[in-house]
Amino acid sequence: MNPVVIISIVTGLIIILLFIGTPLKPLRIIGQGIIKIVIGALFLFFLNVFGNNYGLHVPINFATSSISGILGIPGVVALVAIQKYIL
C-alpha cells in the first residue's frame, strides 16, 4: 500500500477520535482486568516464595493469574487446594 494512503487513513482516524472522543468505558474495563491479572500473578508469586518451605507451588500462567486476580485470596486458597488434593 502506498505510504500516503496509510498516513491519510491514520490522520483521518485521529481527527475522527478528536471530534467524537474515545470510548472510555471499554478501555477502563480492559485496564481493570489487566490490573487484576497482574495482582493475581503477584499473589501467586508470594505464595510460591513463602509456600516453598511447605511444599506448595502453584504455576503462574494466564489461567491461574486470572483466577487468583478475580477471586482474590479465596481464589488462591482454591488453587492451592486443587493443586494439593486433586492434582
Image: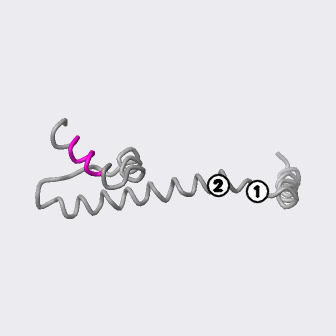
Magenta stretch in the rendered image = 76-82
Report the residue at 28% width, 49% height from top.
59
First in residue order: circle 1 vs circle 2: 1
Q: Nearer the viewer, residue 47 or 8?
A: 47
Q: Position of residue 81 (x, y in %)?
A: 20, 44
Report the residue at 32% width, 49% height from top.
75
Asked if the magenta segment contains residue 48, the reply would be: no
Q: Position of residue 55 (x, y in %)?
A: 12, 54
User: Would you say 38 lies left or right of 58 here?
Assistant: right
Quadrant into which the N terminus falls: top right
Circle 1 sits on which residue? 22
Mark 2 neighbour class, 10 Å CA radius: few under 14, some 14 to 19, many 20 or more? few
Q: Position of residue 85 (x, y in %)?
A: 15, 39
Q: Nearer the viewer, residue 49 or 40?
A: 40
Q: Secondary structure at mark 2?
A: helix
Q: How far is mark 1 from mark 2, CA to CA? A: 9 Å
Contact between marks 1 and 2 (CB within 8 A): the answer is: yes
What is the number of callouts on the image?
2
The residue type indicated by label 1 comes to: Thr
Report the residue at 67% width, 53% height from top.
25
Mark 1 neighbour class, 10 Å CA radius: few under 14, some 14 to 19, many 20 or more? few
Q: Residue furthest left?
A: 54
Assign the magenta stretch its main secondary structure: helix
Tell me which colouring the rendered structure shows. Answer: one colour
Circle 2 sits on which residue? 27
User: Would you say 70 lies left or right of 45 here?
Assistant: right
Label ID, residue 14: none
Q: Position of residue 70 (x, y in %)?
A: 42, 50
Q: Residue furthest front?
A: 74
